[in-house]
Image (tube, rainbow, N blue to C red):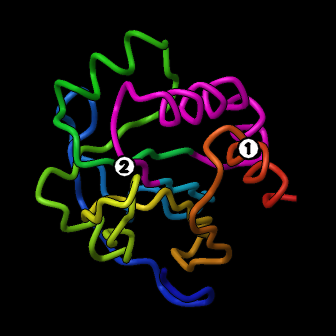
Amino acid sequence: MLEIGTQAPEFTLPDQNGEAHSLADYRGQKVILYFYPKDNTAGCTKQACAFGELYPQFREKGAVVLGVSKDSVASHKRFEEKYGLPFTLLSDVDKEVIQAYDVWKEKKNYGKVSMGVVRTTYLIDENGVIVKAFGKVKAADNPAQMLGALE
């Protein structure tokens, strides 16, 4: 996980509509950058839907929500449409941003070891500095946790 107080790595990734988004586009706003393993899985769906429900409150506090996974643009579009997600989903199929943010890790599942995205959320301030970092977050609780972190 990246250190609090460091500059967040710059990136440009396509969203669910194929449009490019750069971290620099959000200067002047707080950014909740959350990394999740896979579209349409139980935990990731709970997390995304909870972020969606709280999205108006994030906007009131001057924050945007950006979800990142290694799923394709098309997968993100289906995920967004199926659950009516009001925020941006970014596709990192090459895992460049996932690796830059240090969330590609060894995971153990039922004794089997594999590499994957460890559910992690960063709060980045208006100047692009990481001010909070939460690793191995609980999917259902993370959006409320992040709303609290904005206080």
Relative to 145, is 42 above or below? above
Quadrant including the C terminus: bottom right
Q: Circle 2 sits in a helix, a strand or a loop, which is it?
A: strand
- Residue 150 lies in the magenta-colored region: no
Among the two numbered marks 1 and 2 on one chain, the one whose residue lies closer to the N terminus: 2
**Amino acid identity at mark 1:** Asp
**For residue 103, which numbered disc appears in the image?**
none
Apparent side of residue 121 relative to residue 101 in the rendered image (left or right): right
From the viewer's side, name the closer residue of 106 and 40.
106
Residue occupying image coordinates x 78% and y 34%: 57
Amino acid marked by disc 2: Val
Residue at the spot of label 1:
141
Q: Which residue is at the far left?
A: 94
Mark 1 falls on what kind of element? loop
Q: How far from the left and from the top, in percent, is residue 13? A: 22, 52
The residue that label 2 is drawn on is: 68
Magenta stretch in the rendered image: 35-64
Badge 1 density bin: few <14, some 14–19, many ≥20, Cα 10 Å: few
Left or right relative to 44: residue 54: right
Q: Is residue 49 magenta?
A: yes
Point out the residue furthest to the front here.
Answer: 111
Q: Tell me residue 110's x, y (percent).
A: 40, 53
Rendering coords of residue 2 (x, y %): 48, 83
Q: Residue at x 52, y 61 (%)?
A: 120
What residue is shown at x 39% (from left), y 54% (from top)?
109
Q: Nearer the viewer, residue 68 or 39?
A: 39
